[in-house]
Amino acid sequence: MITIATLFSGGEGVGIGAKAARLQHLWGIEIDNAVAQVARNNGFGVETVDILTANPASYEPPTVLHASPPCPNFSVAKQGRRESNYDVELAYAAAQFIEKLRPRFFTLENVYGYRKSTSWAIIRNALNRCKYWFDLAHINAADFAVPQTRKRMIVRAALGQMVPPLPSPEPWIGWHEAVEDLILTLPESKFAPWQLAGMPTELRESLLVDSAGYSNQDGMRIPVMREADEPANTVIANHAQRGIRAFLVGGQFAQPKNGSGKPRSVQMRMQDEPAFTVTAVNKGDWRTWLARGRVVQMTPRALARFQSFPDEYILPDSKTLACKVIGMAVPPLLYRKIAIQLLDSMEER
């Protein structure tokens, strides 16, 4: 039986992908009980355990061991980020699991900044001591048919054998295609002022003016006047929207509060482009503009689609918790393809 176990398991995005690759999930370790319970609700044996207190010798050795250490202190999204002593302690704990269990394969996922950390050096040294061959890649999940441009550091290690090449890149999947059947169920919304402010001027003006020449962003139809030498309102709208059936709008990093602070940069994706990175702190601030001026909000289920979670995955009722579970996860489709490549290398030996 080919098995997998996970450290820093979260809601088991890795577990979903591994099961799809026909691996048997043995166990998982997650310190956040609410997150671990979501994994358990979905059939995964994830324990609520602090890895610093866990004894590796008490766990059954798996074929594949995966680790996704916490990433906030290594992410560009965090201002003044700095590796902590706690990060280093977690790395030592993960290294002990590697050295004690000696899985056939070890995989690790984190933000790309993790590659320069003391934490990664600790894990890398453990792999070297145990005679693993490994590689480190900076991959984009969109290249694995995940409808999201999520860029991450992926480490694949094999005990006593060379690591196979990564799967070949695949065509990107647009965010609209991923959630098209959910569109009618998404709640009505409107763009936030900071989102409008970050859009190109011509596009912003077009969105605020309907085909009859009325402003409609705040639910009030106010006539928009044009001078005789200005283009008609309908011409401006048509010009800005030519070829656009839908687009997704979100933000990057800190949102200003009470009109102060550094503005959040606005991200926009057309209907045939993948969504941008889903994060654990996203609480539904993404808006989608659809044909005929409809603006809707992305739900946790829509965000789960962007992460390639199957619809049968049971999300918690709490929106905050659901977004945390989704945002922290490794996209299941990405991990499935990585796992299949590793397992195929076993069969070739």
Image: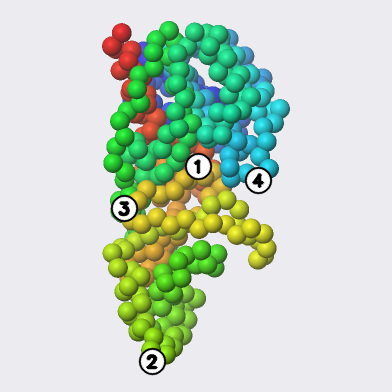
Which residue is denoted by mark 2 in the rendering? Answer: 228
Q: Residue at x 44, y 28 (%)?
A: 137
Residue 246 drawn at (x, y percent): 34, 61
* Side (left or right) of 198 relative to 206: right
Q: Check if mark 4's residue and mark 2's residue have beta carbons within 8 Å.
A: no
Q: Nearer the viewer, mark 2 or mark 3?
A: 2
Label 2 and label 3: CA atoms lie apart by 37 Å
Which element type, helix, strand or loop, lies under badge 2? loop
Which residue is denoted by mark 4 in the rendering? Answer: 79
Label 4 and label 2: CA atoms lie apart by 49 Å
Q: Nearer the viewer, mark 1 or mark 2?
A: 2
Q: Quadrant of residue 245?
A: bottom left
**Is residue 205 in sight in this rendering?**
yes
**Mark 3 belongs to which amino acid?**
Asp
As drawn, which residue projects farthest toward the bottom? 228
Q: Residues within 10 Å of mark 3 (few under 14, many from 20)?
A: some
**Mark 4 belongs to which amino acid?**
Gln
Which element type, helix, strand or loop, lies under badge 4? loop
As drawn, which residue projects farthest toward the front? 229
Color style of the picture: rainbow
Which residue is denoted by mark 3 in the rendering? Answer: 272
Label 1 and label 4: CA atoms lie apart by 19 Å
Q: Nearer the viewer, mark 4 or mark 2?
A: 2
Label 3 and label 1: CA atoms lie apart by 22 Å
Label 3 and label 4: CA atoms lie apart by 32 Å
Which element type, helix, strand or loop, lies under badge 1? helix
Q: Residue at x 57, y 57 (%)?
A: 264
Label of residue 327 in the image: 1
